[in-house]
Image: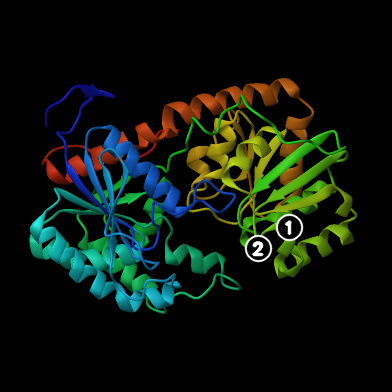
Amino acid sequence: MGGAPVNGRSTADSMAIAIVSEHANPLATPGGADGGEPHVRVARLAVALAGRGHRVTVHTRRDAPGLPDVVPLCEGVEVHHVPAGPACPLTEDELLPHMAEFGRHLTRVWRIRQPDIVHTHFWMSGLASLRAAGQLGIPLVHTFHALGTVARRYEAAGGGARPADLVVRETEVGLACDRVIAVCRDEVGELALMGIPAHKISVVPRGVDTDRFTPLGLAAQRGPARYRLLQVGPLAAHKGIAVSIDALTRLPDTELVVVGGPAAGRLGDDPEVRRLLDLARDSGVADRVRFTGGVPPAAVPPLIRSADVVVCPADYEPFGSVPLEAMACGRPVVASAVGGHLDTVADPGTGRLVPPHSPAALAHAVGGLLSSPGTRRDCGLSGRRRALTRFAWPRVAAMTEQAYEAVLVPGEVAPAALLV
């Protein structure tokens, strides 16, 4: 394929790319604290691919009445609303019966205007697209984003309803597609356990918006404590908020701000919040723990900038966008050494990696950073550089393009691993 060299490779010719994201509509208004929400990731990738000269169509299910069939997202990107099931939000279990209808619609559309390649996101999109792509001879690349095998291992007590045969269906998608794009190297091992051969896997990380998450800008107001720790994300047990609260008992004159979950006015109704507040009271740190609830996306960068250290002590993390957002804002990260954290956080350059489930290890790593302003500054500078050079969306789009080329052009080499 011709074009100017990019990162030592030739740029692909302009492609017609069909992105299928059955539930993550890139037009949706971001509503959570984590910029890594599925619809945000799909939108950012589509826009970045269009920025490289490709024509991108995102197919997503119509989940509200009155939505037009086609909506332009930006120059080079259109969003097609697929009529499959009722025009209202549906749960994962409710979505599955409509995937055959979704796939039939794709077949009709692609017969008229066939894309060069299909990139499906999340397992149901893959399932819905396999037959259409197979019938029309269109190469299909798939990104799981998170695997049912991993989620079930760590969320046994509260992972939510998942189809009983989820792993079987995920394996079907992984084996039938032309290439799997894993979001971190740890996922490659999980895919191998499912029987997906390594030679058909590329590793392409999620990206971070380095124009929105920056070291310079407004910072949220601080509390009376000398130091501030910040944790961002869903209020789920496996995210390790209890570990952070326990670690706080070893960190005097330090507050913990937890961002995410329901709106502030409904925090008292959330059973996980009540459990964590009880833990904070029993641990004697209730006066140093604050839950903000869910906040608008615009509020997240100022909150990150207000922190001395961002903590991410999850039991597991398929990828994790929060460390990237913190690094892009020039803040050091202390994260559990699991999943995607192993690729994103460079220890000791941008922060520290610690064993999961260990409040003592978390407190030790955080304490070392809090006691050394120079180290925190150096980690912040290194984190910003790392975010810009490895995880900015244009870079992620270039790596995704290489994965497409590996399918479309014999002999092309796709990104097999993310260099640390």
**For the residue labelled by badge 1, is the local secondary structure a helix, a strand or a loop?**
helix
Can the viewer see residue 195? no
Residue 302 to residue 274: above or below = above
Horizontal and vertical percent position of residue 186 = 44, 50
Q: Residue at x 71, y 45 (%)?
A: 362
Residue 242 is left or right of residue 42, and the answer is right
Q: Residue at x 88, y 40 (%)?
A: 252
Q: Quadrant of residue 84?
A: bottom left
* Crowd band around label 2 with a 10 angstrom C-alpha radius: few (<14), some (14–19), many (20+): some
Q: Residue at x 36, y 32 (%)?
A: 395
Horizontal and vertical percent position of residue 120 = 29, 56
* Residue receiving disc 1: 242
Task: Check disc 1 and give the amino acid type.
Answer: Ala
**For the residue labelled by badge 2, is the local secondary structure a helix, a strand or a loop?**
helix
Residue 359 to residue 174: above or below = above
Horizontal and vertical percent position of residue 145 = 41, 55
Q: Quadrant of the N terminus?
A: top left
Residue 216 is left or right of residue 289, and the answer is left
Which numbered tag is attached to residue 237?
Answer: 2
The answer to whether the residues at label 2 and label 1 have Cβ atoms under 8 Å apart is yes
Can the viewer see residue 105? yes
The count of marks equals 2
Q: CA distance from mark 2 to mark 1?
A: 8 Å
Task: Check disc 2 and give the amino acid type.
Answer: Ala
- Of the two numbered discs 2 and 1 on the same chain, state the one appearing first in sequence: 2
